[in-house]
Image: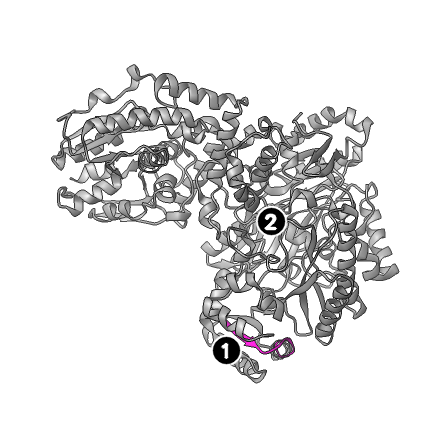
Amino acid sequence: MSSLRECIQKDGMTLKVTSYLRERPSLYARRNHILAELIDIVGKDDAIDNEIELLAYSVHSIPLRKTGVARGEYLLVLGDYVVFPETTEEIQKIVRLANRYKIPIIPYAGGSGVGCRPVFGGIIVDMKKMNRILEIDEISQVVTVETGIYICELEEELNRRGYEMKHLPASFFCACLGGFIANRSAGRLSTKYGKIEDMVLGLKVVLPNGEVLKTPAVPGHAVGPDLKHLFIGSGGTLGIVTEATLKIYPIPEKRIFRSFLFPNLVEGLEAMREIMQSDLQPCLARLYDPIETSSEYFRFSLVPKEVSDKIERKKGCCYLVIGFDGPSRIVELYEKIAIEICLKHKAEDLGNEVGEYWWNHSLDDYYPGLNRPTRYSQFFSEDVPYVYDVFDYCVLHRYSLKTWEEAQKELKKIYKNSVFYGHFSHWYRNGTMMYPMVFVWGLQDDPKELALAYEVAGSIVMRTAMKYGGAFQHHHGVGTLLGRFMAEQWGLSGYQTLLAIKKALDPNNIMNPGVLGFEAM
Amino acid sequence: MKRKLELDDIATDLWYCSRCQMCQAICTVHSVTRRQSHAPMPRVWLIDLARREILDFNDVAGVLYSGCILCRLCTEYCVSRQDIAKITITARADLVNLGKSLPKEVMEVIRNLESTKNPMGFSSQKFSVRHTFSHRDKKNVDVVYFAGCVNDYVTQEISNALLKIFDAAELSYSVISNECCGLPAYELGFSEMFVKIARNIAEKIRTSGAKTVVSSCPGCVEALKLKYKELGIVLDVRVMHHTEFIEHLLNEKMLKIRKPFNRIATYHDPCHLGRYLGVYEAPRHVLTNIDGLKLKEPYKNRNKALCCGGGSVFRLINPEIALQIASKAFDELARTNAELLITACPTCKHSFKQIALKEKGLIRDVKDVAEIVSLVI
């Protein structure tokens, strides 16, 4: 046992330390026996119950004092075991064991922060040793790969062979394929190449009963509903995806980026809608609202000094970066048309160099460091209690500005010390993804008050999106925090359908309980 | 009374690194062990919990010595250039200063340093190479050659090759061998021991009267050139790695390459030579001066080169993880289809040598830059 106490009191906070087995004395008494069984499956080095190892799975890149906030209490929940399977067969055995003892399973990979902590404890199935690239089929341009691979590992290997997968989210250096599939992720090039659900052709899944399901890896079919979509976005609640077959593309002959400054958000949104509806297929498009465009961190990290100065002078302006890739002649033509559309909407053309600058620095603001402004530092200091999240949602074009302004106004009405700002970075012919970042500060350092503020702020954004027929989540997934909106989103019959599927596949509710709003343990 | 820790002075660094995961996948140790406790963010977070007395330092001792190889690859990928190697060494120093129990492998290295003056524990009578070196003028020499303990006991051929080069350049030199520079003590958190060793070495260098110290070990160069200075020990000499010195000899026409060397080779950048000392081009300049030698760059080179797994004394403490790291780096180098692997660090050479013998890829042999040069002069 480590020195980690049952109850930690530190820095004015109290953390209760618990786990699934600790809450159940009869199982806790058998913990060594269960560990021995897990060791039989994966080997001695790959089944661990050491508290320090487990603690590393309960951390999140947010301060300790806030880890319990979302549940309205300060609770540090540890997993009971972590196992590293290396084959699908080992996962089948682990799942069967979990069913026998009725212990939750938490599929885990990069731990980049989207619904992956063991919120009820249980067996953490760390997929990262399943990181083999099984086949690169250059004729069909597909790759079959295990899901514990970091996406940067996969992309690098493909690049070395002249290909790209083009899934380039901000979590590129710390998230794995399995997590992307579990949360319907989107990368920076999604506007042309789609989200992960558009990239996956086929999946291999270990179901909650330990059986294996394999969907055909084909670009299209008419053999009933596509079962792979049951697991993409399932948040690990319906099974563990162990392999995926994905589309790959040759590295394009040319990829360019170009930046513009619009006088206001309306012109920016209209220009982007026109570009998307003109079949120009930009690979990247990111429009920033006026608050984010003028924010300290944006101007520090994402644009060169002269553009930063220009933004300071042009109050209310909105920055757009747009990219095209493919054969040179097509790229040049599409870029030319896009420029024409942007100029028509009163944009100032900042040119390719500024666009390239953005692309080369587009992840810089994720690196905290000395004298680097953060997403909130201009509004308040880190010392004060606050709540924050990104509530990315998706609506049709006709509701994009309306939902944005309405949610912004509602939030301000309730919380004077709040800010709602962000960007629009995944575009479709018919609609767009809205990426509002919401901060509320000036709150009491009380977990219940913080939880309430989080609940209210989230509700304002999600309910505004749903009010106008939108989806309350676009690409971070639902996890445990947003499950409460699932019934509202799908309606009673829709959500009952999901519950029935969950019940049929996982009667013991062992797979990632509590995620997607499904029953907790 | 609140205890004073060295970590408290860099608490801001802990704060930054415990809320960012952007170096996770590239971390040398984590990328092979795949454990979260070895991933930089959770690892720093655990260290911070110990600093804040939520955990006892004893509990993080294992992670502190197995989770970081001090290769500094993470710093190269970090926009803020955070230094997790420094955080790790500082935490180890606090652990030692608090008198906590350390992993037995760490204690063995420290005992070896005390009793045999090398971390491996080789006996000086049995393996020392000092008698094979020709000592020319012991006073007023041009150069002092600081062999470094790995060259003393494991890779003597590198020292022999370099001394052949010195002879060819008609230098007067003396040799300091059978001594450790003290860096392993520093990196394991034993600062006092490091100071003691450093003072002893500094005295020997001063006595030699030389104006230049050359070492074949990048770790030794780092210690003599940078770490001693941090301790306030001024050597008043120029400290060079042998690749820099050979480049200097060639530039000054004190050394002439006379023969071709017809091989296809790849060059591995040692962490301490590259990421710590910024020496990337000198070895390449030396090698590209040799007729017939075709140099193929690995995909990951210079500041992004993979670590060999030796990493100071990491291999002595975590042999299994070190082997996995070496194997990954070797695979990367083998993908160049080179037949010869050249490096510039005895630890790297030793790490790769054992894998090359297993006949992975085309690489059948591992040599130091000095060995190649000694063959063509």
Chain where mark 2 sits = A
Q: In which quarter of the image is the N terminus of chain A?
A: top right
In the current view of this chain or complex, which residue is farthest to the top?
A: B125
Q: Are marks 2 and 1 in contact (CB under 8 Å)?
A: no
For residue A176, the mark is 2
Q: Where is residue A373 in the image (x, y as percent from the top left)?
A: 55, 57
Which corner quadrant of the image does residue B153 belong to?
top left
Which corner quadrant of the image does residue A81 belong to?
top right
Q: Give the range drawn in magenta.
A: A257-268
Q: Position of residue A197 (x, y in %)?
A: 66, 59
Q: Position of residue B315 (x, y in %)?
A: 44, 29
Specify whether residue B148 is painted magenta.
no
Crowd around label 1: few <14 · some 14–19 · many ≥20 (10 Å): some
In the current view of this chain or complex, which residue is farthest to the left?
A: B170
In the current view of this chain or complex, which residue is farthest to the front?
A: B1
SS at badge 2:
loop
Tell me which amino acid carries mark 1: Asp
Residue hosting label 1: A349
Q: In this view, does B43 lie to the left or right of B338?
A: right
